[in-house]
Image (cartoon, rainbow, N blue to C red):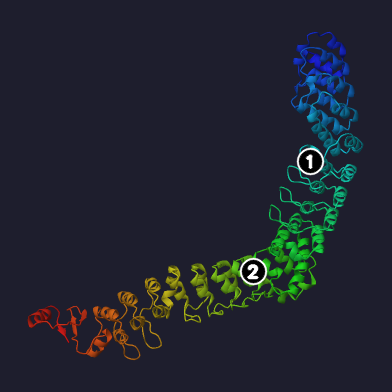
Amino acid sequence: MTNFEEPLQAASSGNFSVFQKRPEGGLVHSITDEDENTSLSIAAKNGHQKVVKRLLEEDPADINARNTFGETSLAQAADNGDKDVVEALLQYSDIIDHESYTRAVSRAANMGHEDVVKLLLENDDIDPSGKTNYVSKAIVSVAENGHDSLLMQLLASYKIDLRSTRTEGYMALIKAAQAGQNKVVELLLRRYDVDINAKDANGNTALHLAVQAGHTSVSKLLLGRNDININTINANGDTALSLAAQIGQRDTIKLLLASDGICINIRGASWQVVLDIAICEGHKHVVDLLVARDVFDSLMNGNSMDEFLHQAASNGYHHLVAFLLFPLAMACAACPGRTPLSWSAENSYIEVLQILLARDRAPPLPPALLLPLEVYVNFRDDQGRTPLSRAAEKGHKDVVGLLLQFKADINFKDMDGRTPLSRGAANGHTEAVQILLEHNADICLRDGEGRTPLSRGAENGHTEAVVILLRHGADPNLKDSDGKSPLWWAAENGHEAIADLLAPTDTDTLLLLTTAGKHTAIELLLRFKPKIDQRNHDGRTALHLAAQRGHLGIARALILQGAKINLKDNYGQIPLRLAIQHKHGDVIKEFLKYKAYTEGIMAAEWRDAHGKENKETILLSKTPDGEQYLDFPRVLPRNEELSKMFDKLGSHL
């Protein structure tokens, strides 16, 4: 043993003789162990009063030296409960360091050392203004550790307001409840100055902490006070009930639910209600208690049941799925709307669907859900939608396939006349569309607006869906109730790729767009070589229709794309004649530029088309290339001018 180790070992064993031989005290006090304990603190901790006194007689002695844990000699002696050593240390006024003294009081109180606690609190050297803090600290420590007799002594000896937050006294009930100290809690609850709703730094009340620690008997005592706020929320957004639901404490939850004023649908910081918490944790018995306590709508507090069902199923709590369906089935029976199957199909909750559909392998289902499977799988919601319709609209291909296995009606129409194929195509869900077509979905069924699935897909620009539909025989020329074809919808909405697909086989869209004056859509369509001279039932082409309606830009675009300008309709009319009849002067001029036939058109017709009087002169000129120009000069040209014009143009009246 080295000279440095000898005094530490002697202090630990109480070997007084070692210190008798050492007058050089300073050297002894400078020696510490690996935790920075001095000989004095080691002797104090081990209750060697004689060694402590010997070391205190030496100079210098750092009586308030702290080890690596912040413990002084006084704190270690108090923890050991050695009254004589504590008393010896208290003979020195330097011992009154607030932090170390507080720790000493707390240590003695924790261990229930009545004599040491009393000695520390009655020390005349402590500051009277700080005494209340020491007493409060002792009360909290005694309460937390269940020393009820010592607590009664302290409460009787000192006037401490346990409601005041100026000291730690208000924490006595909180700490006792957290530690499950029944007798102490009962004792404190009999006092008028205990605030049962006091909170710690995290916003927890005594009830929060008792519930969280699983102390049901303490919770029962607390709930017996009529001034308790049972719905208090802590800093994490939890109530006592939500904490109990997390842990799954059946008895505590029963107590809470039986209490007046309990609110079961408060949302916490994670935006979960109690029912959601219980489901997430897989506590079926908690869900059972909650459902028995309240109506289901109140429990959900705005949550949709599909969230609860999915949570239970995806976490593997299949026993909860069937259980949750009981109240839900009752709600479905009482009020038509969405079924669990409908919710699950829309949100692709495969686990729940398998439970609902595979009845021979599922947990027992509520009687209200045990309709014939063919009826249940096709049960319509309040919008006339089936589960298959919901799944197809969202593109849940696995759900679509599963429902079809269980005989879902593939062509069932909703209130809008839409089939599942129509819903899937409209949203471009190609895999769902493919599955439906492979199961012989009717590709040409029209909805309430006369629209086909191809029309819906084309409108929204879903090229892949359109390709699939065309491969399976969709008719691109079927028009809706407004006479619009799939190509019309694609061109109108600027979907070039689809226009390119549909234009070669389309027969009506160019005519429809021209009638509607859709110049931009026509410009797009013309890039894909539609049948530009296709005729309608009157034998009129798109150019006829543009002339009739005065659509100059469309007429010009058609001519530039190669539309035949002099084709006659069923009534023998060429486009120019229609433009003249409807007095579209700018269109007339355009046709004349492109060599429209003028034979047989009377002067009166020209004048009427341009709003001119019968006496006005008409001059129709033609270039050698055949371009024609119409004018109404106020003064006839002189012979010389006419001669020059004839040489240049060649003309006739």
Q: Nearer the viewer, residue 169 or 66?
A: 169
Q: Which residue is mark 2?
A: 401
- In the image, residue 108 lies at what x, y percent? 85, 30
Provide residue 89's location: percent of width, then percent of height: 83, 20
Q: Residue 164 has which mark?
A: 1
Residue found 65% across the figure and 74% down from its top: 386
Left or right of 374? Residue 230 is: right
Residue under the point 86% across and 44% down: 180
Q: Is residue 609 above or below residue 102?
A: below
574 w.r.t. 367: above or below: below
Q: Quadrant of residue 365?
A: bottom right
Which amino acid does the dot numbered 1 rest on? Ser
Q: Of the numbered discs in the image, which one, if any, rests on residue 314?
A: none
Mark 1 or mark 2: whose residue is earlier in sequence:
1
Residue 532 lies left or right of residue 60; in this view the side is left
Determine the image quadrant of residue 370. bottom right
Q: Residue furthest left?
A: 640
Give whichever of 516, 510 is nearer the camera: 516
Assign the N terminus to one quadrant of the image. Answer: top right
| Element on which disc 1 rests | loop
- Residue 278 in view in this figure: yes
Q: CA distance from mark 1 to mark 2?
A: 67 Å
Residue 454, given in percent of the width and then of the height, sits at 51, 74
